[in-house]
Amino acid sequence: RKDRKDSQTESTTEETFDKDVAEKKRLAMPVLARRPSVVARPPGDNVLERCHYQQEEKEEITDDNAKVVEFEAKCAPVAFDSRAGGFYAQAGKREEQATQDVDKAVPNEPNEYLVEAHTVEDPILVTAKPDSWLRRNRCWIVGGCIILVIVIVTVIILTAVNMDGPDPPTASPTTVEEGIEEQIKGLIVSQLPIQNEILSNKEMPQHKALQWIVEQQYNDGSSWYTAERVLVQYGLAVLFLSTTFAGKDETGSSFWINSDGWMEEIDECDWYGVLCDEKSSIVGLNLTENNLAGSIPVDITLLSSLLSLDLSGNALSGSLPLKKFKPIDLVTLNLAQNSLSGGIPISFSELTKLAILNLSDNSLSSTIPTEIGDAIALTTVNLANNKMSGSIPSEIGNLSDLEELDCRNNALSYELPSEIGNLRTLSTLYLQHNKLLGPLPSEIGLMSSLHTWNMSDNHVFDKIPNVLWQGSALENLASLDLSHNLLTGEGSSSDFHQFGESWNKLTSLRLFNNFFRGNIEQLFQRTDNFPSLEEFDLSFNFFHGTVPDDMFDMRKLKRLNLHNCGIEGSIPTEIGSLAELTTLMLAANQFTGSVPSQLGNLMNIKELRLDYNKLKEALPSEVGKLDQLEQFTASNNELSMTIPSEIGTLDSLKVLSLWNNRLTGTIPLEVGSLIRLEVLYLYDNQLTGPIPSEVDTLVGLEKLRLDFNRFSGTIPSQIGNLASIKEISLEYNQFNGAIPSEIGKLDQLEFLAGFENKLTGAIPSEIGTLDSLTWLGLWSNQFSGTIPSELGSLTGVNFLYLSNNKLTGMIPSEIGSLVGIKALYLDSNDLNGNIPTEIGYLVQLEKFQLSGNSLSGLIPSEITNMVKMEDVRLNTNDLSGSIPYSVCKMDPVPAIAVECEEVICRCCNPACTQYTMPTLSPFPSTSPSTSKHPSLSQIPSLVPSRSFMPTSSLAPTRQAVIVTIEIQLDTWAGATGWNITDSANNTIHQVPAGTYRLQLLNTVYEKVSLDSGLDYTFHLLNSEGYGLRGRVILYLGDTPGVENILGYYVDSGDWFYGYEIPFVAHEDGIIESVTPGVFFSWGLEQTAALGVTYESDGVPAGIESRLQESFSEYFIPNTEPNIAIELDLGTSGKIVSGASLQSWYLTSIANISVGVAPDDGNPVVSDPPKLPTIPDDDVVWTWYEMGSVPGCCNHVREVVIPDVYARYVKFEIQGGYSTYGSNWGIRQVQVSGYDALPNNSTGVRD
């Protein structure tokens, strides 16, 4: 074109020029005619339209009869013409070809001026023919049309003739629609690592999105869409279809909260949450809190121009689809508050422009990838509230622009990398609630921009680090939290003297729950180091001394917490000078003297805690000035005199707790003015008088405790106005009269205690309307009349105590409706009639007291349904019949008291004449369960079950053998003794009760010489009757060993008087029993390899050595309630006879199962074996249930396994939790058994 232009004649006149321009504009009209009739996008979006505007600007005159239309490179993207059915890939056209196309545009005739449009791989110009060409060739065109019509008519006739014939074979796509679909599919596959099968699967959202594009966008006559727009529409459609479950419901609405425009026939820039730039490119997608569910499809990565993606606050799950994230210009990625799992892909390193990364509040695991250091544009990284583990990579130091790093609430461990000091722009560092170790790197002192640093709840062990003083550059630090670590330091030494030097901007300093000690008076040498301090928390440390005077120079303090710091002396009067205080915590110290009246100067105080000290005298009336006070606790002191009436002016008060003092007088009537009060604790004082009727104004009161005082008078009916009340405790007072019927209005009431008073009259039936009630205690009053049948409506009640009253009549049958009740006490009344058979419905009942009444008739057999019975008292009645023997076989055997002259009972207390000492069962026996894995069947034993021969069949010769008795208890058991008797009940050996006073985990031994082959019985006795829980082990020989052991587990509940173990000792080294219960012949700490895994697939470190030591508690975080303990017994295997597990103090477990499986042929991992991998797919398990564990204390659960050959043993523990700290624990697991001998046919153990 340039050459042609250079050769033009320069003599063209202006008139000729204007004429040519007008003519050429007229001839350009065929090009304009190809534009779509309806264009929804603005100018610039349609390829042809954009090119047309450029055409008008770029027209140039080359000679009198020729015109060339130039299209710039940007006017030649990939285009699609739906009518032609083809793609035109223009980018990449070689310049030489472009020149050739232009040369071909040089006309030989005056009116020929544009390159002809044709389908090629890389066309660069789109042209049309002028009218003159049409005139010259109209004959050929008419002729061609006639021929085409003839062909079409012929095809129709032939089709009609053969329409009843066989179906023709399927051919390749020939229609325009099929061609479009195949080409779009090819384009998608070329951009994503996705298989054709996914796009062809009609159930997949990808296929549905493809069909929508073909049918809705390209079959309606529109034309010319870029490949970029095709991919964008496809990616958006897949996202919509993947995260709405079924797309749209029958009403046409999606499950998204807002789906306006999505997959409708409008421009995608108008869809909800889509943000486009001036070129109509999608640069932002914000669908936060829009109820998206399912997984994030990888197809979303087709949004190549995306700069910001925000899908936070939804219900998305699955892993991050970022293996090939195309939008490399992405600046913001926010996927927080979902349920995403898996790890962080290393492909983040390709997002070199990413500035904000927020993946918080998900379930991401694995480690932080080291490649995160390659995303050098990051300014914010938020990984909080996930399950990340491992260390913080040193590559984090490469992020020189990082301003915020939030990794709180994970499981990160190891020390902080020294490279963290490179983050000179970092202002916020949140690392709390992890497992990070110390000491802290000194390079932290180089982080000059650090404003907020929270390192609480980790395992940092160090003195106050030098990095926090001595030339520290942390002059911008405003908030520092190092609480709940292992930090140490002496207040009287240099550890603190320069602490925080030059921290002029520090507003919050929290150091609670560490190991600081020393004199608190010398804690800080200069308080002017903290001129801006607003919060100061030193609670739960080990200081001594008095409150330092210099502390009161920090006049900006708003929150001061010195709880449990060991501080002595009086509360300084200067504390009233801290006028900005909103929170003052001085509880659990050794403060003495009186409460200073200067506290009344703290006009902004909202929370004041003075409890658990030794404060005396009266509360000052000045507390009535604290009109902002919301919580005031001064419990457990020695306060005396009356409650000041000024307390009624505290309009904002929500909690008033003054229990366990020496307060006297009455409750001031002004208490009725505390309309916001929620908790009122005045119990354990010396208060007198009635409950003021003014309490009816306390409509927000939830807890009222007045017990252990000297209150008198009647319970006011106004108590029925306490609409929010949940707990009422009035016990141990001198209240009289009847309970008002208005008590039935308290529909929120959960706990009602009125025992040990002088209440009279009938128990109001209105109590039966209290649907929320779980605990009702009215014993030791003077109630009369019958038990209201309406009490049967209290289906949520767990504890019902009506003992020691004057109740008469029969026990109402409605009592059987209390299906969740655990304790029912009706003793010491004057009840008569039969025990209703409906008690059989009380399957959760543990304690049942009916003694001291006039009940008669037979004891109902339905008592056997109460399978959780622990204590049953039926004595001092006129009952007859028997306690079914099945009750005596319960484990543990319940403590039962009856009148033995009338009732037959084999397992009642020793007062019964029919009392027979029960035989001690071995481990609680459980049959194999297939409910866990329905396809499992019991594993056959490789050796026969042990047979126990009768004594008469043994050899007549006798030899003296030594039997050692070992007793190991898990609880204190009182004065315990034992004896051994022969078959004639002659005492062979005796240890009198009281010889030993067994304590927790204290083991004692006793040896006795017996003749072999005879029947003996070992009796375990307890003269004091306390409960016993532990092991009884008999074995042959002089010293404890691991062979020939006969063991039993005892769990007697509250009361224990005796158990029996029948046994036979043979001279050939065998000790047997008719009730066999082999305890253990080897423990996992001796031979077995083991491993512990969490349900979240995390594997804790160091467990090989921890659990292989006997009674070395292994702790598991409460956040991991489900674990598995796996044992590999080696390829030789064992004959497994039982298993046991002992829990740690205050640990509760919902369920324990133990499974055994035979050898699968896999080699042992190492010698000694460590952390075995037991693939469930390769072995067949038989499962036995071991039950649950309550919350206290050191419980053992055991199970008999009927001599099964096994290589693998697995304990599956579910629902582990402890209320003591943040970890639950296991003390020991053991397995019973003996070696398997291939040729052992006698069943005798080796």
Image (spheres, grey):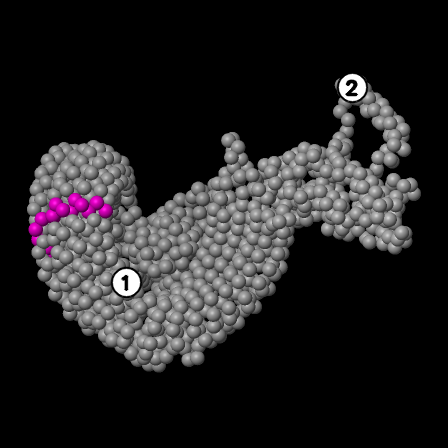
Return the x and y of residue 687 as percentages of the image width and height. 10, 55
Residue 587, relative to residue 952: is it above or below? Answer: below
Relative placement, left or right, of 428 versus 640 is right
Q: Which amino acid does label 2 sit on?
A: Ala
Return the x and y of residue 342 as percentages of the image width and height. 53, 54
Which quadrant of the structure image shows residue 564?
A: bottom left
Relative placement, left or right, of 837 versus 38 is left
Taking depth in this image into account, of 735 and 1027 the one nearest to the observer is 735
Tell me which residue sits at (51%, 44%) in the image. 292
- SS for dot 2: helix
Badge 2 is on which residue? 160
Magenta span includes 971: no
Part of the protein shown in magenta: 685-700
Taking depth in this image into account, of 255 and 1239 the one nearest to the observer is 255
Q: Does residue 15 appear in the picture of this structure?
A: yes
Tell me which residue sits at (40%, 58%) in the image. 1117
